[in-house]
Image: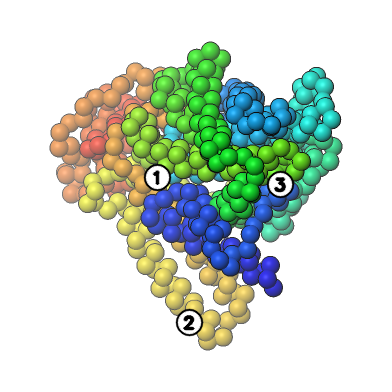
Amino acid sequence: MEIAFELVALAIVVLAGTALAERIGLPAPLGLIVVGVAASYAPGVPTVHLSSDVVLLGLLPPLLYSAAIGTSLVDFNANRRSILLLSVGLVVFTTSGIGLLVHALLPGVTWWAAFAIGAVVAPPDAVAATAIGRRIGLPRRIVTILEGESLLNDATALVALRTAVAAGAGGVELWRVGTDFLVASIGGAAIGVAVFVVVARLRRHVTDPILDTAISFVVPYATYILSEEVHSSGVVSVVVTGLLLGHKAPIIQTAQSRIAERMNWRTIAYFLENTVFLLIGLQAQWILEDVRNGGVSAGRVVAVCVLTLLAAVVLRIVWVFFARYLLVRPGPDPTTGQLPPATFTFLLGWAGMRGVVTLAAAFVIPVSAPHREVLLLVAFTVVAGTLFVQGLSLPMLARRLRVPSPDPIEDALARATVLQQASKAGFKKLHDLEYDDRNGVFALIKQRIEQRNFAAWERLGTAADQETPSELYTRVRLAMIAAERERVLDIRKSGTVASEVVSDVLSMLDVEESMLDISQERRGEVRLTAAHRRTGDSCADLDAFPPVETVENPECPDCLREGTVWVALRQCLVCGNVGCCDSSPRRHATEHFHDSQHPVMESAEPGEDWRWCYLHHSTA
């Protein structure tokens, strides 16, 4: 009961602390560390000793798997050089630099222990970097590199740490270091691919979303244990398996299974990620107590901790600029056509927050190591220092450097374009199918797809005080669903209908309402701002007709003549004709295209800057 009570209390503090941090605008990882440090000194709170086994076996596999299945394999592959230079090259560089520094500052510490603590503090944390990066809206390319780096750098750091520990135990031959790393990385990748093949084949025969999700809970642990048993890297195996399963999910899983898995893993990751930072804070009291009882002076302890923190930050910045200008030399961003500026590189170097793996790996250092308590405090200082110094300053730095965040209006344009191209492929398949349409199914399908696409285009923004048809539909339908649910609950209360039937009806209403809620949230994110990036596939017609200044106070003459109302206006870039959009009742812009075959139009709405090609279904 005592253990159960402590676990429940831990969960309550994590959830309450996260909610409070979000309410006051503080990143949850930082707030939970503060709560953990304060709790470690509170009377009645038991001392929590975080062991390496709990983190590396209990927490790390699900956290890595959750991050991996949500990472784009396409984006990962596009940035693989940068990711590998950071996850391998930077870890080795930092390990060496910190090792030399600690050995020089801390008398009596052996070379192997110095390099061990270098390996411990070398890898940034996936959770900390991406949680703060996404919250403040870092560019997606930076977030992708940070995610990819933090997925793989743990493997490099753990191999370096185990090599240093083995050297301290009885010596290790230098050539074995490279061999061990190759075995760990290549073997881990091979096991990850093998597990992916097995699970993918299994999932093709599993249609029950509950069973499919249960399988996904087993995969990260089974993969990690199998890989570690054959002396490969469990980290690499879990990451490879997660990346491949996430990439192939639309093919090997049913829609219900994908939705269930995505929601369950989001919940698990949310809870575990925040629990990790609370546990980090809870280590403060006993680590500081051990250092106080050690034989190293307070001044030297402070010097070692502060200089190691400073070195960890500086070494990363030096490496990212060295890698950018001498090794990688990145090409233009595929979405902007421009080279990433130096501000991106500096921001990438600054976003090197450490996390739970650093603190957990420190416990791998043997108890017999000289000044072990100081080395543990060094690890704690680097974790807490990078989270607070870099984590708190990262939003301000991004603003000062004017680093652009993802633009909601560009996302809305891309979303509408992709949906339009998907619809085009769907209609082509529909025409190829052989069926007897006696009941007007074709017209019904066309109507529903057009409504979906129109709603996507309407999110690009119209007048702020004007309600679009999709917004009106959402508002009215949500009110209807509330009334419908109330009636169904009255029927349930009467007991005249089987509870299973009532539950099915309520589930149908829930699904429809959740879709409307998502649509409403996305519409609220869109700002009336100019979109400058090319989105989707370009074409010769878009290249031939660049954007122009649209007419002032545009009107649809056909709507005025017919006495109808338009939702938004479009201007032909060939002849300048202004017509209403497809969300409007009469769709005069599309009618003009069919009559004239003029291929490209531009939005004539204030604050919008995008074009559409009718022939190729592409935008710019």
Q: Earlier in the sequence, mark 1 or mark 3?
A: 3
**How far separated are the C-alphas under marks 2 and 3?**
54 Å
Q: Quadrant of the C terminus?
A: top left
Residue 400, how many percent across, how many down? 33, 32
In the figure, is residue 51 to the left or right of 342?
right
Q: Secondary structure at mark 3?
A: helix
Residue 487: x and y, percent? 45, 78
Which residue in the protein does label 3 denote? 52
Quick one: 350 or 588, which is closer to the camera?
350
Of label 2 and label 3, which has the lower sequence position? 3
State the SS at label 1: helix
Q: Which residue is mark 2?
A: 490
Disc 3 residue type (three-letter): Ser
Q: Position of residue 417 (x, y in %)?
A: 43, 36
Taking the image as drawn, is residue 604 in sight? yes
| Residue displayed at 49% across by 34% down | 351
Graded by Cα atoms within 10 Å as few (under 14), some (14 to 19) or many (20 or more), the crowding at tag 1 reads many
Judged by depth in the image, the label closer to the viewer, 1 or 3, is 3
Q: Distance between the Cα atoms at labels 2 and 1?
A: 36 Å
Foreground tag (2 vs 3):
3
Left or right of 21? Residue 197 is right
Query: Three-letter amino acid code at disc 2?
Result: Asp
Q: Coloring scheme of the render?
A: rainbow
- As helix, strand or loop, the secondary structure at mark 2 comes to helix
Question: Residue 127: x and y, percent?
Answer: 56, 43
Q: Marks 1/3: CA distance? A: 48 Å
Q: Residue at x 23, y 46 (%)?
A: 463
Task: Give residue 456's mark.
Answer: 1
